[in-house]
Image (spheres, rainbow, N blue to C red):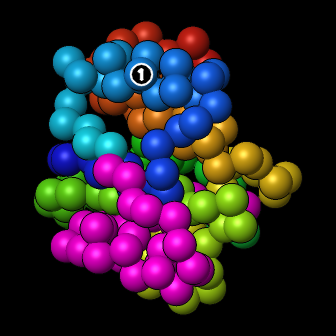
Amino acid sequence: MQTLIIAVNKPTLAYARAGVALYEERLRPLGKVELKYVKEGSALEVTEAMLRAGEGCLRIAVDERGENLTTRELEAKWRGWQMRAVKRVAFLVGPADGHTSDLRAACDLVLSFGRHTMQHELALLVLLEQVYRIHTILAASPYHRD
């Protein structure tokens, strides 16, 4: 299953740039993961660009209003998508002001990393870490929580 991660603008903070580069490198041998960035704009423009970029994919919005899943619960959903022959999954990481209600409604899942507010570049980094962790679990690498 191909993974597309769509975010608004490339990270500008040094720690986020370094973290994204680190996880891109770690993910390269584990599976097809593509990062795509859309331009910042109005809430409507960003929503339209993200939905267009994720067209044809199972869409997952990363948003504090979403479902807070454990890594194992997210991995179980991932396996379910694979069993249903989902070819592409797209994670949408919003801009600083978050996603619109229209974008959340257009997604198959709204995923939260907690109810607290998280800077969007940090949310991108947390998402990459979770995608990496799921890929390692699927590759039968030991998972320290088992």
Position of residue 85 relative to residue 50, above or below, is above
Residue 72, image x, y percentages:
53, 38
Looking at numbered disc 1 in the image, what kind of residue is underneath it?
Ala
Residue 47 in the figure: left or right of residue 82: right
Residue 4, image x, y percentages:
29, 51
Residue at x-position 20% and y-position 18%: 29
Mark 1, secondary structure of its residue = helix
Considering the image in quadrants, where does the C terminus appear? top right
Is residue 82 covered in magenta?
A: no
Position of residue 74 relative to residue 143, above or below, is below
Residue at x-position 39% and y-position 70%: 50
Which span is picked out in magenta?
36-64
Q: Dot 1: few (<14), some (14–19), or many (≥20) neighbours within 10 Å?
A: few
Position of residue 35 relative to residue 64, above or below, is above
Is residue 38 covered in magenta?
A: yes
Q: Which residue in the structure is indicated by mark 1? A: 21
